[in-house]
Image (cartoon, helix red, strand yellow):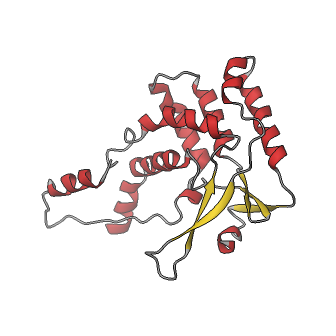
Amino acid sequence: MNRHLSDENTYQKMRENPRLDVNNAFHKELRRICGGDNATYDRFKMRVAPLPYLYGVIKTHKDGNPSRPIISTVNTVTHLLSSYLCKVLEPLVGTISHAHLKNVDQFYEEVNAVIIHPDMVLASFDVENMYTNVPIDMVCDYLTTYLENFALDFEVWLIIAMIRICIVGTCFQFEDQFYKQIYGLQMGAKLSPIIANIALEIFETNSVGDIVQQSVF
């Protein structure tokens, strides 16, 4: 686990427990973006919340059994807001890229329907450490425009601001040490799977074709 935490491009070690600062900063920013909407502020506030914590899950299928870092955010300060945003963003998954697959059964159906020609080339992409490599700014910039196509409870700019305060700069504890994640998503956070899927769909839509052309032809 210490190998993961030594990545200075992803994590920053903190000198002391930031729990109170994290709680105060979240509520200050939530109050700011809600303006005078006290009902929305009260809906998502989470007083006296614990700090997220890091634990490892062993990858038994990999050589050497490395650990997968999981950051638990259950009942933390962003819990209520993240739960709401999951309901808002989950319907978007699968609407951005035509290559999105819901499950293995759909993959089998798609593959069985393919007529293979001699000039076809099979291209495979493998994402390494996907969650911590997701460019959050890119996803938020894309959603700023894309969300205009959907009926929402709040204005798009407010949804984007809510996303940012849930996933940017997460502080957490591992054993007796404290860290801040300075890039990417946290595996284990409620919003992370949805944001990661959206990021992949953006990549599939905007970049895959060009990469295949440049690499194969």
In the shown orientation, is residue 156 left or right of residue 120?
right
Q: Position of residue 60 (x, y in %)?
A: 46, 75
In the shown orientation, is residue 28 left or right of residue 210?
right
Q: Position of residue 69 (x, y in %)?
A: 60, 64
Q: Nearer the viewer, residue 214 or 7?
A: 7
The quadrant the N terminus occupies is bottom right
Q: Nearer the viewer, residue 156 or 44?
A: 44
**Against 132, is 33 above or below?**
above
Given the current orientation, which residue lies at the most extreme right position?
15
Q: Residue at x 24, y 66 (%)?
A: 121
Given the current orientation, which residue lies at the most extreme bottom position?
64
Residue 173 sits in quarter: bottom right
Q: Nearer the viewer, residue 125 or 58?
A: 58
Q: Residue at x 68, y 18 (%)?
A: 39
Residue 52 in sight in this render: yes
In the shown orientation, is residue 167 left or right of residue 49?
left
**Against 6, is 180 above or below?**
above
Q: Residue at x 63, y 35 (%)?
A: 80
